[in-house]
Image: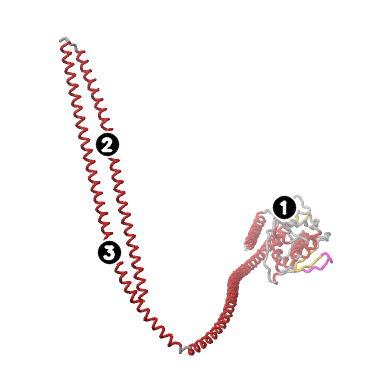
């Protein structure tokens, strides 16, 4: 709806410009010192803002008087070919003329609008203008009347719609003072237009109404010089006052028409806004309805898919049931065949039973003899059983005696084994004691020997040192120097070193002897442990042998018991 607001703004701007133009015209007329000469109609350039109107009621429609300018037969057709759409959007030229008449402004305007001049044959054309294009007529007439001060500007005008090559130029020679020559009428010079689009422009109703508006303006400009020529003998003051009144009346009429146009535009905008709101509400309803329909359709599709899935499942289940039914039928046939075979066997068994009963009835006499023979055999078997029982008792007694004997022997062997183990442990303890005693004796003897040897060596060294000292004292003089004493001490230290070396060697020899003795003792202990282990192994083997014999005897006893029991039975 932004273009409606733009149209309204442009209409308001047009009204403001018209009011400003009227005020300027009044101010200009007031400040003039003397009334100006009656102006000839001049054409100036201005700008018409694009205004689109709402359709008016039929009362607002007035027939436009279309007057074909003399000497220019193609002006109306050139104007008719001008597109109204491009005129309303692009910049165009305003045709301004100032007609001068002695009548009042309102009467002259209404006479001009309602006049019906049928003269000039084909040069005049009457075209009814619809209420939709009334705004263009009013805007154009207002621009014509509002250009009273346009006499000071250039008189050339060119109407050029945007987007079309057809142009209308209204030229009039202008004097240097800005007033055109008398007895000269404005002429319309058509410019070449596009012949290809001429038919389309003529067919459009908008183009026809626009051409009608332009013809009305041209007619008004043509008549205005006549009025000015007629009013030439009048005084300048009367012409100025009449021109001022005409300006005021035309401006007031234009203002009223523009206000009506704005009101109609506002009404149309309100109706369009209401219709747009209604259409939006209807669109929202349709969207909600479409959404509900799509939801229902999706639900129906889902239900159909579920039903199809259930149908497939039921079909598969039906196939499985058919397969099971076929299997059950096969099994039923097999069961029927088995029942038939069993019935046949039952009949055969019944026949065999009847035959056996008959045989039994025939052989009942032979049963007595067989019973007597069986009784005799029973007596013989009882006697044999008593004999076997007696033999079983004897064998059981012998087995018990043998078992007790074996148990006694086993106990004796166990006692002997424990005694042997005790003796072995005692011998080991004694051996360890003896080894310890031997080691202690050896260590004590070696220590005693060592001490004795050390004592002997020390005694011998002391004796030797003393003997040497005595000999040196005897042989030497009493004036022995200190160097001699040091030599003696050095000799004594050397002797002590030698003695220590000898003691170390003796200690090493003693250690070697002790190692050899220890190795001998370990070998002896190993031999004794081996012999004791062999003794233990032999005793264990004999024990296992006795256990095996006992088990064999027990098994033999059990066999004898079973035989006796079987014989008794």
Q: CA distance from mark 1 to mark 3?
A: 168 Å
Question: Which residue matches tag 3?
Answer: 404
Residue 465: percent from left, percent from top: 18, 18
Q: CA distance from mark 1 to mark 2?
A: 159 Å
Which circle's residue, 2 or 3, is located before the other in the chain? 3
Which circle's residue, 1 or 2, is located before the other in the chain? 1
Q: Are marks 2 and 3 in contact (CB under 8 Å)?
A: no
Question: Between 409 and 162, which is closer to the camera in this rendering?
Answer: 409
Observer able to see residue 3:
yes
Question: Which residue matches tag 2?
Answer: 517
Q: CA distance from mark 2 to mark 3?
A: 53 Å
State the extent of the magenta-drawn residues as a range. Answer: 115-123
Q: Mark 2 or 3, which is nearer the eye?
A: 3
Residue 77: percent from left, percent from top: 80, 62
Q: Mark 1 or 2, which is nearer the eye?
A: 2
Question: Which residue matches tag 1?
Answer: 153
Left of 111 or right of it: where is 20?
left
Q: Residues within 10 Å of mark 2 (few under 14, many from 20)?
A: some
Q: Secondary structure at mark 2?
A: helix
Magenta stretch containing residue 92, yes or no? no
Which colour assignment does the render follow?
secondary structure
């Amino acid at each position: 709806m932004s273009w409606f607001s733009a149209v309204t703004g442009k209409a308001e701007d047009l009204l403001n410009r018209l009011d400003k133009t009227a005020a300027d015209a009044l101010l200009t007329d007031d400040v003039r010192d003397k009334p100006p000469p009656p102006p000839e109609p001049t054409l100036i350039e201005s700008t018409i803002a694009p205004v689109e109107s709402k359709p008016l009621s039929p009362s607002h429609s007035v027939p436009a008087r279309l007057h074909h300018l003399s000497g220019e037969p193609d002006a109306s057709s050139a104007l008719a070919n001008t597109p109204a759409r491009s005129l309303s959007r692009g910049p165009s030229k305003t045709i301004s003329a100032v007609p001068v008449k002695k009548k009042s402004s309102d009467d002259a305007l209404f006479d001009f609008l309602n006049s019906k001049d049928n003269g000039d044959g084909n040069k005049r054309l009457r075209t009814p203008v619809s209420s939709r294009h009334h705004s263009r007529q009013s805007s154009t007439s207002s621009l014509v009347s509002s250009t009273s001060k346009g006499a000071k500007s250039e008189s050339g005008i060119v109407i050029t719609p945007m987007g079309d090559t057809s142009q209308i130029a209204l030229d009039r020679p202008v004097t240097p003072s800005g007033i055109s020559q008398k007895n000269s009428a404005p002429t319309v010079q058509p410019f070449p237009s596009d012949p290809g689009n001429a038919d389309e422009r003529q067919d459009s109703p908008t183009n026809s109404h626009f051409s009608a508006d332009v013809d009305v303006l041209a007619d008004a400009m043509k008549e205005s010089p006549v009025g000015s020529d007629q009013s030439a003998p009048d005084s300048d003051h009367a012409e100025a006052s009449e021109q001022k009144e005409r300006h005021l009346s035309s401006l007031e009429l234009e203002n009223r028409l523009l206000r009506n146009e704005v009101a109609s535009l506002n009404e149309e905008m309100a109706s369009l806004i209401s219709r747009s709101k209604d259409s939006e509400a209807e669109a929202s309803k349709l969207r909600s309805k479409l959404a509900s329909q799509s939801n229902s359709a999706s639900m129906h599709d889902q239900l159909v898919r579920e039903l199809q899935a259930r149908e497939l499942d039921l079909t598969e289940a039906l196939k499985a049931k058919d397969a099971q039914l076929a299997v059950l039928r096969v099994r039923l046939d097999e069961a029927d065949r088995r029942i038939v075979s069993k019935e046949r066997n039952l009949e055969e068994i019944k026949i065999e039973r009847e035959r056996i009963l008959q045989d039994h009835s025939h052989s009942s006499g032979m049963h007595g003899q067989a019973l007597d023979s069986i009784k005799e055999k029973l007596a013989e078997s009882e006697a044999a059983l008593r004999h076997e029982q007696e033999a079983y008792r004897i064998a059981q007694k012998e087995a018990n005696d043998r078992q007790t004997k074996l148990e006694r022997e086993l106990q004796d062997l166990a006692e002997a084994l424990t005694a042997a183990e005790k003796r072995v442990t005692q011998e080991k303890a004694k051996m360890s004691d003896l080894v310890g005693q031997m080691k202690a004796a050896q260590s004590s003897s070696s220590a005693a020997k060592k001490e004795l040897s050390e004592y002997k060596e020390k005694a011998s060294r002391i004796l030797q040192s003393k003997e040497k000292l005595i000999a040196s004292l005897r042989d030497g003089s009493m004036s022995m120097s200190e160097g001699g004493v040091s030599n003696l001490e050095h000799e004594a230290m050397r002797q002590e070193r030698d003695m220590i070396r000898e003691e170390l060697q003796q200690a090493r020899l003693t250690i070697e002897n002790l190692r050899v003795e220890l190795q001998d003792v370990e070998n002896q202990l190993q031999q004794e442990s081996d012999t004791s282990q062999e003794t233990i192994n032999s005793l264990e083997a004999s024990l296992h042998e006795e256990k095996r014999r006992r088990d064999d005897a027990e098994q033999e006893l059990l066999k004898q018991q079973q035989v006796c029991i079987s014989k008794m039975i």
